[in-house]
Amino acid sequence: MRLPLSRKVVVGLCLVAFFVLLSLIGPLFMHTDPQATGPDVLQAPSCRHLLGTTQTGEDVLAQLINGGRVSLGVGALAACVATVLSVTIGLISGYARGAVDGVLSIITSVFLVIPALPLLIVLAGYLPNKGIESVAIVISVTAWASGARVIRAQTLSVRRRDYIEAARASGERGHRIIFAEILPNEITLIAASFLSSVVVGILAEAGLSFLGLGSLTTVSWGSMLYYAQNAQALLAGAWWWFIPPGLAIALVGTGLALINFGIDEYANPRLRGIRRKMPPSPPTPAAAAEVAGDAVLSIRGLSVDYLTDADPVHAVADVDLTLHRGEMLGIAGESGSGKSTLANAVARLLRPPAMVTAGSVRYQPRSGADPVDVLGLDSAALRAFRWADLAIVFQSAMNSLNPVLTIGAQFDDVLRAHRRDMSAIDRRKRAATLLERVGIPGERLRSYPHELSGGMRQRAAIAIALVLDPDVIIMDEPTTALDVVVQREILQEILQLRQDYGFAVIFITHDLTLLLEICDTIAIMYGGRVVESGTAAELHAGPMHPYTRGLLDSAPRLRGDLRALHDIPGAPPDLSALPAGCAFHDRCSYAFDSCVDTAPPLLDRSGRRVACLLHDSALRPEPVPEPVRGRP
Amino acid sequence: MSEAVLEAYDLVKEFRGSTQRRVGKPAPVRAVDGVSLSLQPGRVTALVGESGSGKSTVARLLSGLYPPTAGRVLLDGSAVRVRRGAAFRRYTDDVQLILQDPFSSLNPVHTVRYTLTRALRLHGQPADGLANLLQRVNLTPAEQFADRFPHQLSGGQRQRVAIARALAARPRVLLADEPVSMLDVSIRLGMLRLLARLTEEDNLAVLYITHDIASARYFAADILVMYAGQLIERGPAESVTQHPVHPYTQMLIDAAPDPDRPRGQEAQVPSEATRERSHKHSEATRERSHQHSDVPSLAAPPAGCRFQPRCPLAMPVCVESFPAETQHGTDHVAHCWAYGEKGSA
């Protein structure tokens, strides 16, 4: 785990440490009594009095150092009490819910709406003794409520997480669930709330003292300001009297706020921002990636890296794929195989830190015009290209449809942007036609996404993808979130639509058995590379790569006799730590010596392609292991 | 068949109030309606259904996390009435639950050692059982895994830790709620094999909840099929998958991906779209489709058989009442009017 030592935090820590050390160690070296009056009244800083003196001849530096003890002490003590209060009340309130939560929430809300400063003044006014402990407690009474509110909200959210349910199901005791399971997950929040309470405490103490309501017999930064104000130090031009305590308060507050930023960034990595070096050169359009035959999309040598603080992670490495007009190309892969990154690269949807580092994507328009270099499109050309020529359907239609717009408005957005000359009536007609075409009544254009079922939403997303009659649709796990019956309906619909409209599909999923049934050709990805490709029939009849074969042999089937299943040992590799040689070798039961150090190239074997050294006659051992069994 | 360890009779669970996601519908949601089942030692029973069918709620009712609205749960033949405290803990000595998502079911702030030792201690097991537990779920060498945090483990390894936590109690019943659906396809079989091995070694009674009926065929002795909160078919796994009786089970099996299906004979399920097209002018259908969900709304379920609006065999009687059980071979029963004497129930 990396500590959040950004520049902000370092500065913050230095500021706070400076004042804490000053007030802790300072008195050991500074023997002057801060309240000892002397003959040198209202002296500017000099060698005798480094920060000058007050109207009664007290040493300002001695006051600053000793006052720091009080101010910081009050702040810390008030924050401790306030944090204990807010954590206890927030946790109980959030965990117990029901009536307990109701009562505690009302109390919290009351303290939140009472203006803190007047309450503080009233409470401090009635204090029987004005020692710093009682001041601290009064401050904490006014400061705990906002923290309690935040911690209650967090507890409500944490208690719904699976690990809390799992702990309850395993029979864990209630108090341990609160203190050992929930509380540690709120530590950053509690730390942040503590630090802001310290700031509040210091400021409140200064405010009270400045108003003369604090403990005026002890020296604090606040009481220094009070006396300076009473003596009209400002008018007298005695800046050395009020600037040091004022500055000290401001700097400690700044320091604590900076540390708090650091905690936020640590708890919320997205705030860290991306300060990583980008590769200087844009991807080189690969030479002569001409679009052959009836290919509509040619991907050549495409590589995508995720740039991290350490070495770049090669999410997609040297991928060659060709999508023919009207073809259904399936890409199968597990998590971390690079399949979605590949789709996003082709659709130009990659966001930093992902970068295309090599390769080309060529699109051949239907009209017979010149092929388009997709990776080289500028943003205006890209807007025209996306949707009109290449559309995308994502896994969760709820995420890709805008929840606050009707389905009709979302059709309209696309049409207005791409078909400027189309009239509103024509746009509406076009949208209704397509919606009915995917089996949703046209009047549903007035519906909002949440009014449709999951299957209907995915149909609507497909209809919107079709509205400009694109040549290519990329579907990234379009049916994974759906139930199997609905999935089947959508698949049927996609196959039918493809027949009617003639678009080509790149269908991405983890489910190879599904692809075998619906696709023309299939590419299997593993560790960022294509390890095998061929027609669905070829792959089904005889998978060449041991991984493909393992996937098929481990899938339970519903038809035919029960047969022996074979599982693949191990787990898919982490892209940031791919095994050397063949990425699959440590899970492969056919692996031999060369697999450990030689990365297998994608070999052409009579139209099929496979990246496995077993198919490399120069390297494979004798006798040749029999990797391909006839399929039952 | 040996004596059942855990049985449930006519379980009903209604959710009401603010836990509902859809606002403006005060009607209680009947997530589970009249479910009965029994789990035997050394035997895996699969509970199959789509999302929203109530199968996960059944697991939570059996685990004691939710109190049932009606119906009984019996452990070793005696009624279970535990909500909290020591009685609930004693119940969890026998009945343990494994959740679906290993990425969220382990507390990120605790090491594997903490999670497992805590589970051992809670159930009065010696704390030195840790290494043995890790070994049993194939996390070896044990010392290497004990001090890791969840984020340092892969999905499969986390799920093994979750299984080990359940085993720490030395339970007799294991409720596994979709234990492999969040895992990568290449490691699912290994995880199911592990569960099968543990079932045999410890003579566990296992409820395997899944939406994947093909995996149920291979790993369960019996299959129960749930639709919209009700059990609609149950029987031996091979019988249910090879000779499904209920139209919904048939639909489920036809819809499952199957590379062995001859090309050109794509599965045909009566599509929600064609239905909506053909019934376009039917007021009732439009009303229904307005609150359409793939599994019907449980706040206002269809009358009679809940599958009737989607059913290719629907008859007038189907709207009137839920069909009684009909027998279709040894231990294979279904609830469908197509096989019953109309009106006799």
Image (spheres, rainbow, N blue to C red):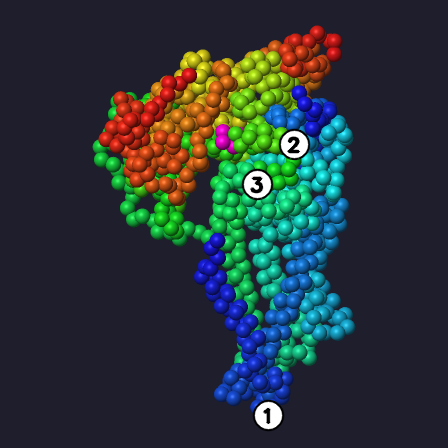
SS of the residue at dot 1?
loop
The residue sitting at the left extreme is A288
* C-beta proximity under 8 Å, tags 3 and 1: no
Q: Helix, strand or loop at disc 2?
A: strand
Q: Nearer the viewer, residue B39 or A326?
A: B39
Residue B45 covered by magenta stretch:
no
Quadrant where the N terminus of chain B is found in the figure: top right
Chain for numbered disc 3: B
Residue B22's tag is none
State whether discs 3 and 1 lie on one chain: no
Residue in the picture at 63% in, 44% down: B119
Of all chains, the one bearing label 2 is B
Spatial CA span between label 2 and label 1 = 87 Å
The answer to whether A173 appears left or right of A527 in the picture is: right
Q: Earlier in the sequence, mark 3 or mark 2?
A: 3
**Residue A136 position in % (x across, y down):** 68, 68
To the question of a shared chain for discs 2 and 1, the answer is no
Nearest-to-viewer mark from 2 and 1: 2
Determine crowd level at label 2: few under 14, some 14-19, many 20+ residues with C-alpha closer than 10 A. many
Q: Which residues are magenta?
A: B188-192
In space, the residues marked 3 and 1 are separated at their CA atoms by 79 Å
The C terminus of chain B lies in quadrant: top right
Residue bearing mark 3 = B133
The residue drawn where x is 50% and y is 65% is: A12
According to the picture, the residue beneath numbered tag 1 turns out to be A39
Instruction: Identify which residue is drawn at 67% across, 61% down.
Output: A82
Residue marked by disc 2: B173
Q: Quadrant of residue A362?
A: top left
Q: Main secondary structure of the magenta part?
A: helix
